Image (cartoon, rainbow, N blue to C red):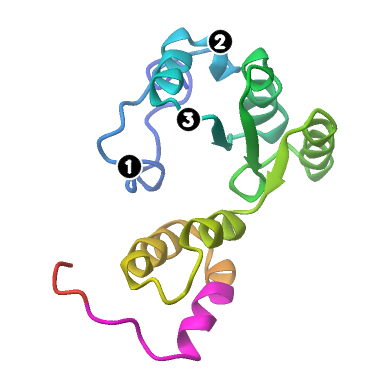
Amino acid sequence: MSVRDLSGPLIPESTRTVPDTEISDRSLINAWQNGALGAAVEATGRRRLLMAGLWTEACLTLPALSDRSGAGYEVFAVVDASAGSSTAAHEAAIIRMSQRGVVPVSSASVLSELRRDRARSETYHAVMDVVATTWAPGDRASIISGRLCSRPPPSDSSR
């Protein structure tokens, strides 16, 4: 998004977990229309994309439904990491994307799929850091409650 002319700097929470990521200053609503972004994604060689956007009906839907999503990408829309200009707009965008093959997911399902097993102590701190720094307090309770009912994770002296 255009930080110079339109929106101002990004909030720190949006860049804290990926501090070395270059911010693309752009005015295009559809991020895929920015050639540099498409080239960067292509360079990763990854075919599964997790997407979110400021406005579900614009910043998320437009790139998710762009030609790139039809070019062999499997697109997942993290719907609770995006917000619409209204509840109706958010829900309509999710339906529209779903009808075109984009898979709606929640941030909790993404974290669970990445972690896969609660016994994986090497992923515990990274997941909890994301939860603690980006989720709303009410949402945090649902994932943290699992931790309260079990033994704490093994200590990690590297942290």
Residue found at x 67% / y 45%: 79
Is label 3 or label 2 in front? 3
- What segment is highlighted magenta in the picture? 141-155
Residue 117 against residue 32 in the figure, above or below: below
Per the image, label 1 sits on a secondary structure element best described as loop
Residue 43 drawn at (x, y percent):
39, 19
Q: Residue 101 location, x and y as percent?
A: 77, 32
Location of residue 87 (image quadrant): top right
Q: In the depicted view, which residue is nearer to us: 56 or 39? A: 39
Cβ atoms at labels 2 and 1 below 8 Å apart: no
Residue 126 rendering spot, x and y as whole percentages: 35, 61
The residue that appears at 31% across and 26% down in the rendered structure is 22
Residue 97 percent across, percent down from the top left:
77, 32
Secondary structure beneath disc 3? Answer: loop
Task: Give the CA distance from mark 1 to mark 3.
Answer: 18 Å
Q: Amino acid at mark 1?
A: Val
Within-10-Å neighbours for mark 3: few <14, some 14–19, many 20+:
few
- Judge whether 23 appears above or below 121 on screen: above
Q: Residues within 10 Å of mark 1 (few under 14, many from 20)?
A: few
* Residue at the disc numbered 3: 46
Direction from residue 70 to residue 118 in the image, left or right: left
Residue at which label 2 appears? 33
Q: Which mark, residue 154?
A: none
Provide the residue designation for mark 1. Answer: 18
The Cα–Cα distance between marks 3 and 2, rounded to whole angstroms, is: 19 Å
Q: Secondary structure at mark 2?
A: helix
Q: Amino acid at mark 3?
A: Arg
Marks 2 and 1, the one that precedes in the sequence: 1
